[in-house]
Amino acid sequence: MKVFISGNIAPIGLKQLEENNIEVTQWKENRQITSEELIEACQNQDGLISVGPNKINADFLNACKHLKVIALHSVGFDQVDVKEANKLDIAIGNTPGVLSGATADTAFLLMLAVSRKAFYLHKKILKGEWKNYEPTPELGIELNGKTLGIFGMGKIGLEMAKKCIGAYQMPVIYHNRSNNEEAEKAIGAKYVSFEELLAQSDVLSIHTALTDETKDKFNLDVFKQMKREAIFINTARGGIHNEHDLTEALEQGIIWGAGLDVTNPEPMSADNPLLNMENVAVLPHIGSATQETRNAMAEIIVKNILAGIKGEPLPHQVN
Ligand code: 8YV
């Protein structure tokens, strides 16, 4: 059986594929594979391990109908045309659960960094601007007892909420399509309407999938309904906030700060104005980028591939 990998996965995954006699071809170039190259590379393969933002759209799926399984190196599957995959009977696997802690850590890191202007002040040192001690300018804000709003209370949102409660006793409110009883029971999270979430959150952290419903959801109108002292955090997908509107909201002081692990587009251009703002922290989509999590993701990917090429249901199948 043959599998193409469109990037790098943790060595443990490669080892397990080899132990299971899977013949692996891997994209080794230091750039993202193009759609045409991906189609070409998948021609005589049984499965694909899709690493990074490859578009698994109708064109790709129809050109690669013969694939039995596509194992994503992500929990998110917004890049996949799931309906088309269903029509063509191609199993799509993802990696849920194992990256919740690492992604929540990234959200927490960004929240704290924004609250103390950490990335901005660090850049000032690099520019030789740490001159003398000045007690008042560029002050941060404290998080203790502030209200955390979670948009999309799933596994990652719950992890973020637990960290915020543990560190800062933050009361937690959330908005979802439906109640998350586990979160309500486990941490006393309170379900609120979207409008209440905006009006009451001191920190609003996004943990939902990118869908037609959530695309551009956080736009200027929405930022205007948030508190002026609010911090907006997005570790989910850049498409959920409108980057132009977020920039305007920050420039005009409509909200206080923002921490982003995801941008739109990715990579973010080096001259993006958000990168020079005092109350902004941006990371290059590192949510799941720890050794432990990437190992665990690779192991799930292998399980998904092995099941898929045998025509069995995947342990983590999205369709
Ligand atoms: C990945 C992610 O790093 O799981 C997700 O949805 O965004 C990240 O874990 C990314 O998809 C690269 O494969």
Image (cartoon, grey):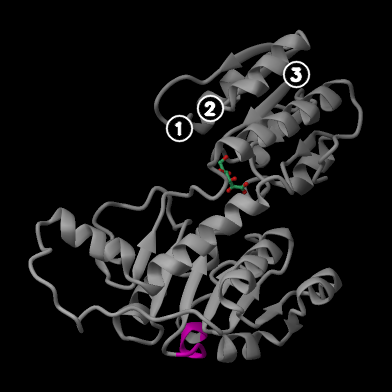
Residue of label 3: 46
Residue sitting at 53 percent across and 42 percent down? 289
Residue sitting at 47 percent across and 68 percent down? 111
Q: Quadrant of the N terminus?
A: top right
**Vertical position of residue 220 compared to residue 272: above or below:** below
Badges 2 and 1: C-beta atoms under 8 Å apart? yes
Q: Which mark is residue 7?
A: 2
User: Which amino acid type is marked by label 3?
Assistant: Asp
Nearer-the-camera pick, 256 or 25: 256
Residue 249, located in which quarter of the rendered image?
bottom left
Secondary structure under the numbered disc 2 in the rendered image: loop
Nearer-the-camera pick, 57 or 317: 317
Q: Does residue 43 belong to the magenta stretch?
A: no
Residue of label 1: 32
Looking at marks 3 and 2 on the same chain, the residue that comes earlier in the sequence is marked by 2
Spatial CA distance of label 3 from label 2 is 17 Å
Neighbour class for label 3 at 10 Å: few (<14), some, many (≥20)? Answer: many
